[in-house]
Image (cartoon, rainbow, N blue to C red):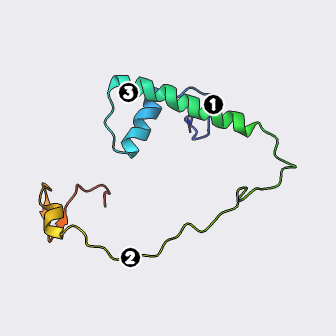
Amino acid sequence: MVKGKEGKARVGAKVSKDDVKRVAAVARLNLSGKELDRFSGELEKILDAFRELEGIDTVNVKPSFQPIPMSNVLREDKVKPSLPQAKAIRNAKNREAGFVKGPRVLDR
């Protein structure tokens, strides 16, 4: 949500490039200038949709947890031959102890 200096949401505020940069930084995405422009517009449309939903009066509306009856979609588990581990990871650039080693995504 777009927030002001006080950390409170700005109602009807435009999504700025800085807002998109902050979201991208959290997601560890490197966005180009074109992408920043594009995503600020797309995020603004999403927030507008939520603003519209917030205006709907739902005081006398009962919750509808599952409007469509559910049927059992489970199936029995069956053991099938799978790709050998060595073959599955042979094209991985970084391997360690039989596993694919990826970049660290969480800072400690």
Q: Which mark is residue 48?
A: 1
What is the crowding at mark 1: few (fewer than 14 residues within 10 Å), some, or many (at least 20)? Answer: some
Residue identified by numbered label 2: 78
Q: Which residue is drawn at 13% across and 58% down?
A: 94
Give SS at disc 3: helix
Secondary structure under the numbered disc 1 in the rendered image: helix
Q: Quadrant of the N terminus?
A: top right
Of residue 17 and residue 74, the one placed in the foreground of this image is: 74
Q: Which of 52 and 18 is in front in this view?
A: 52
Q: What residue type is labelled 1?
A: Asp
Q: Distance between the residues labelled 2 and 3?
A: 45 Å
Q: Nearer the N terminus, badge 2 or badge 3? A: 3
Q: Looking at the picture, how far across and down is residue 68, in whole percent?
A: 70, 56
**On the rendered structure, is 44 left or right of 35?**
right
Examine the image and state in which quarter residue 63 appears: bottom right
Q: Which amino acid does label 2 sit on?
A: Lys
Q: Residue 35 carries which label?
A: 3
Give the spatial CA distance, label 1 vs label 2.
47 Å
Residue 37, horizontal then vertical, whole percent: 42, 23
Q: Earlier in the sequence, mark 1 or mark 2?
A: 1
